[in-house]
Amino acid sequence: MATTEQFPTELQAHEADGSPAVAIEDLCKSFGTQAVLNGISFAVSRGETLAVLGRSGSGKSVLLRLIIGLQTPDSGAVRIHGEDIAGLSLDQLNAIRKKIGFLFQHAALYDSLTVEQNVAFPLLHHRGEMSDSELGDRVKQLLAEVGMEGHLEKMPSEISGGMQKRVGLARALALEPDILLLDEPTAGLDPISSAEIDDLVLKLQAEHQMASIVVTHDLHSAKTVADRLILLNQGNVTAEGTFQELQSNNDEFVREFLKHS
Amino acid sequence: MSDRKLLAVGGLSPLFPGQPLSLSSPERTASKWVGTEFLEWFGELGIFFWRVVRAGATPPFEFRELFRQLDEIGSKSLPLVALAGAAIGVVLSLESVQSMTRFGAKSLLPAALVYSVVHEIGPITTALVVSGRVGAGIGAELASMKVTEQIDAIEASAVNPYRLLAATRIVACTLMLPLLTLAADACGLLMGWVALASSEPLSFHQFITSGFKGADFNDFLPPTFKTAVFGLIIGLVACFQGMRTRGGAEGVGRAATSSVVLSSLFVILADVVLVKFIIIFFP
């Protein structure tokens, strides 16, 4: 337990060193004989939003799972504030996970808990000195931030897909992370709900100044929320830069991807 | 895993890499494959159990979830277990009256009823009923959480799912089975007496005095506490099958079914070993 308590201080020290919040170095991941990620590298700093684009099955979601330690890479390194997560104990990894918010593709809300209990879940398990009333206030504040303050008692099955994503975002922000990972935040939503989620991500990013990585198929969404984009193809980073830089890229796959998006 | 399956189906034993292609019959190859799967399953179960023990034995302890599971597994199984115990008591009583009368041992009927209910019928009936109700419930619930990424979400929130989901359920099953067995035994004996008294003039006091005559704690404690092992098996197998599920609704269904089938099977097999163990150590 002592290690768990000490680790955030170490993270802050790394941050002061100027290390990027997330650094991916030569990352490889295969499933059986299928290589999904083939030595990709990039870095994301605090206050920056990176969009990861690519075809279905190009390893975008796997990349996020590797960053938060839900899967382990075959080789290469995932550095969070300069610390390679591969050699960490579970306590140390959990200390890092507390600083990372993760919005899952289908929100992954706990279906036996209400909206309020879903957002309270991370706080209940890592409440520290927080009293019950403070915890309740924090949950209400988080839900208000995502515009869901009127739905505290509803079950996840009683709210729409867009609302579930909002609640998922509130839960991801509960522990005040400095890194936010968003897996297809607008997938399966109508254009208006997608635009609302994009606006919400922009607002939260402006308020919290996190290092954000957004995995998406939605080029419009990527263009709206991201400062920088990378395009994955066959396990490699085919293109990297701003949206304008990608538009002027002459690579055949990049042009094809942008044309059909 | 899939590579190894392919190798096995193709005739190459994964246990002996480099062995040339087998010329054995398809039946033999299939049996080898089943054998490998069986060993793999047990190996994975052992690793899972070790992770649960390690997670469950270290703080922070999930008391809130444990109490919820004690209620879910214990209190909510009580009516079903009591009913099953009562029905078994009646059937056993009706059947025994016939056979004991035929062999002229009618006076031993209360003792026979008490011994059979407390020693074997109560524990095994309770375990099988709980396996059906709780095993399927845990298997389906955890499998559903797995396929909808809820377990990943727990892990991403820096909470250990082995501690929160598995350890609490396994401990609850282990603690509640002996208590549920006592309830099944009590209902079985009570209804056994009712069935007996409906044909013979026998007071409950006479029934109990005659049934428990010459009995000591060694007759009742080991058979009751062996159900803690049954609870451990039910909780462990159901959590394991649920948390290793793959695929969507089909995977959830498979996890629920296999949780019940495997936990019931292992309960019966464990009973064989435990009965022998009790006979040796508590003669």
Image: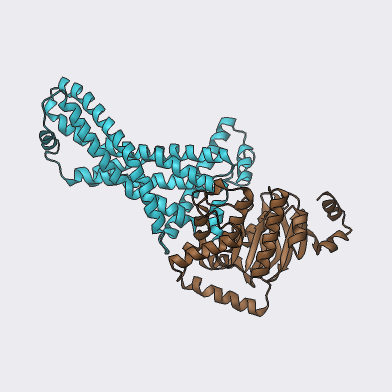
- Image point 76% across, 60% down: which residue? A224
Q: Quadrant of residue A18?
A: bottom right
Q: Quadrant of residue B13?
A: top right
Front in this rendered view, residue B275 or B220:
B220
Q: Quadrant of residue B98?
A: top left
Percent x, y for residue B125?
A: 32, 36
Q: How many marks?
A: 0
Whether residue B40 is visible? no
- Image point 12% across, 40% down: which residue? B214
Asked if residue B253 lies left or right of residue B77, the reply is: right
Front in this rendered view, residue A204 or A249:
A204
Vertical comparison of A212 with B172: above or below? below
Asked if residue B25 lies left or right of residue A223, the reply is: left
Q: Which residue is most to the top?
A: B102
Percent x, y for residue B135?
A: 42, 42
- Image point 61% across, 60% down: which residue? A146
Visual hue assigned to chain A: brown
* Chain letter, cyan: B
Asked if residue A132 lies left or right of residue B210, the reply is: right
Percent x, y for residue B164?
A: 45, 56
Front in this rendered view, residue B207 or B67:
B67
Percent x, y for residue A35?
A: 71, 53
- Image point 47% across, 67% down: which residue? A134
